[in-house]
Every structure is written in C-alpha cells, then in structure tokens.
Amino acid sequence: MEERPKLRTIDIVPIQFDGRPHLLLRDPFQLTDKMLIVSAQTGLLLALLDGTRTLREIQVDLMRLTGEFVMSDQIEGLLRQLDECLFLENERFREALDLAIAEFRKTSFRQSSLAGSAYPSDTSSLRAMLDSFFEPPKGPGRPEGQKYLRPLKAIVAPHIDLSRGGVTYAWAYKDLAEAPPANLFVILGIAHYPMENLFAATTKDFITPLGRAQTDVGFIEALRKRCGFDLLADEFVHKYEHSVELQVVWLQHLLDEVRIVPIVCAGFEHLVELGESPMSLVQVREFVEALRSTLSEWDEPVTVIASVDLSHLGLRFGDRHPITPSILRWLESEDRLFLEKVAGGDEEGMFYLIRSDHNSRRVDAYPALYVMLKALGEVRGEIRHYDQSVEGRNESVVTFGAVVFP
C-alpha cells in the first residue's frame, strides 16, 4: 500500500441506496468493471486521499473535520477495496492503464462506447429516436430542403445524453441538414478527464450503429506539424469520451458517410493569469493558430462543431443545496448572456464571463467555444434553442443550447 495514498480521477455519482444517500464509484476508463458503493460520509475520507497525507494524517484530519475517530483498520480496508478496483494512483493502476493504451493503439478504429446504453445499438431504433427529436411542438420540425447556399461555418450542439438533450441537438442539426454538406467536420469535444496536454486528437475512425465515420488523417497531420506539443499524446482519452461520439451519430444519421477530425479540449481557465487572454498560453496559441491556418489552406468546405454543455449545478456536482426555481431563472439569464457572446463571435468576452465569477456555473465546454471562435475569426451566429435538464428530485441541473453560424 502507498504510504501517501492518492485517489485517481474516477466517476463519483450520488445515488440512493437502501433509502439513504450513498456514492457510486466507477472507472471512467473501464479498466475494470468493478464498482463500489460507499456512504455519503465516506466522501470526506475520499477527499483526503490526495497523495499528501499518511494514514495517520488522514485519521487526524478526519477527527478534526468530523469529531469522530476512525480506526486505522477501517481506513486500510477501504484502501484495499479502492486498490482492487484500480481506483488508486499507484503502480498497479499504471500497469493496467499502460496495457489498455497499448491495446487501443493497435486498433484502426474507435468502437462506440455508448451504443446500447445512452442510445440504441439497433440501427433502425437509433434512427427513429433521432428523428423523434425534430417533432414539434418542442422540436424544430423536420429538415426541409436547402435554405443555405453554402455549408455552415459552425454549429454549437450539446453533448448531454440524448434522452435529455435530444431536442436541442435537433435545433442545431436542422440548420446543418438544410445547408449543402461540408466535405469535412472538425469536432471539438471536451475532455472530461485529465490529460497531459490541453488538446488531443485521434487518427482512428469512429464506428457506431450507423456505420464507420472516416477520420481525416491528413488534416490531423497538418495540425500536428504546426503544434509544438504532441497532439496524439493523450489519444487514449478518446476511447470513452462521449462528447465527440454523440456528434458523429447525428452526422451519420443526417448525411450517412462523413469524414471527421475528432479533437478534445481540456480546461485552461486556471492557467490563465488574471487579466490575460487564453492566447497567453503557449498550447492554446499554437493550437488556435494551427487550426486557423489548416482551415484556411484546406481545399474543401469544412464545418466546425463545438460539442458543448453549459452549466452544471447541484448535489451531483458538489453543491450543498438542491435546485430551486429561482436558481433555474438565474441560470437561464447567465447562460443566455454567455450564448449571446458566443453568437456574437466574442470569444474574449465569453471567457471574461467565465473568469469574472470564477466559473461558478461550472461551464466545462468553454475551451471548445474559445478555440472555435478564435480560429474562425469574424463570425456571427444565431441562438436556436436553450434548455435545462433537472435531475432526480431537483437535485442537480445541466444546461445547454444550440447556436448556428451560417
């Protein structure tokens, strides 16, 4: 056992078990199918597993925080369970991760991680599901012919699961379907787990129940040559990252065969000095300039897709209080102001809103929006839709919107 145990980044989901609040622990990389259910009070102990404390120091800090003394054998028992599930940052976990990365690199494709769970694995059922989101009164209606003379420059669509955000996806993709199709789609997703760098691409094709979407290796190589960091160093995060996959499914449904450039972006707000632009960060500047140059030199029409959810509030995200109607009204006001900056092509103003309140709404998708707007230059969009998905008994909420850039 490590002298100073550290919990690695895992999914921690609040659940009800035996009528009481508990935490479900699971591995986002699926290195193991083992899961743990622990009491909500154990969450405080988990927070102390940051790699800086010995077992004795964990006991002392728990006593200070709770007033209760926890026996060392109880803590050791939990640590053994965490280790068995590969939830600790240690050699056993690193060996399993290295093996998984090596296996992933051998494949030429990235298999769907959501088929059969977040959406049907059956082709006809999946198409029927996606079609249903266009239906009025909530949906925008089915696409009707071409209303644009050229492919859209970009769209902003959610990456929340389809059952909650499907209608908002439809509002973004209706415009895309009513424009001449681009030859290539650059999809900017969000990395929901730590990466070495701020941006990661993959050269693997994406397979879904709707077929195989070809990844344009040439475009990715053009980006790599312009970046001073390895754009493929964190390629493994694509294996289970959903923010790109969900856009691929919509593209395949509407256009059948598509070519894509899958990229995920990591958060960088904490790296930007107060009053500075994200362009002060070397990797942000290099990637923005690489994307801008590659887009301008590419001899085919390209549409950029930003895969974006907005606010994340409530018990699931660490807040102490449930969601109230007044919170939802405040969220909508703040979110719409944010979307207006996006639609206005004001990436610096958008980022200022994030920094001005220390991202209190936990908008995790701002990197994709910032990079998209900065790379495209002078663009103006239109907000098509906004929605909120409240979970459980008003426990948490995720918000999202649709924006199109003709």
Image (spheres, rainbow, N blue to C red):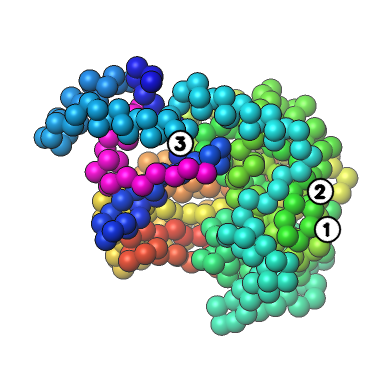
Please say whether residue 31 is visible from this viewpoint: yes
* Range of magenta residues: 33-51
Report which quarter residue 357 is drawn in: top left
Amino acid identity at mark 3: Cys
- Give the quadrant of the C terminus: bottom right
Check if mark 3's residue and mark 1's residue have beta carbons within 8 Å: no
Q: Residue furthest left?
A: 67
Query: Element at badge 1?
Result: loop
Circle on res. 257? 1
Residue at the image position 45 percent from the left and 26 percent from the top: 89
Residue at the image position 54 percent from the left and 67 percent from the top: 163
Left/right placement of residue 329 relative to residue 389 reads left
Percent position (x, y) of residue 350?
A: 50, 47
In the foreground, 9 or 15:
15
Amino acid identity at mark 2: Gln
Residue at the image position 22 percent from the left and 20 percent from the top: 56
Check if mark 2's residue and mark 1's residue have beta carbons within 8 Å: yes
Q: Could you tell which of marks 2 and 3 lies nearer the N-terminus?
A: 3
Q: Could you tell which of marks 3 and 1 lies nearer the N-terminus?
A: 3
Q: Which residue is mark 3?
A: 85
In the foreground, 110 or 175:
110
Q: Could you tell which of marks 2 and 1 lies nearer the N-terminus?
A: 2
34 in the magenta segment = yes
In the foreground, 305 or 163:
163
234 in the magenta segment = no
Q: Which residue is mark 2?
A: 214
Q: CA distance from mark 2 to mark 3?
A: 35 Å
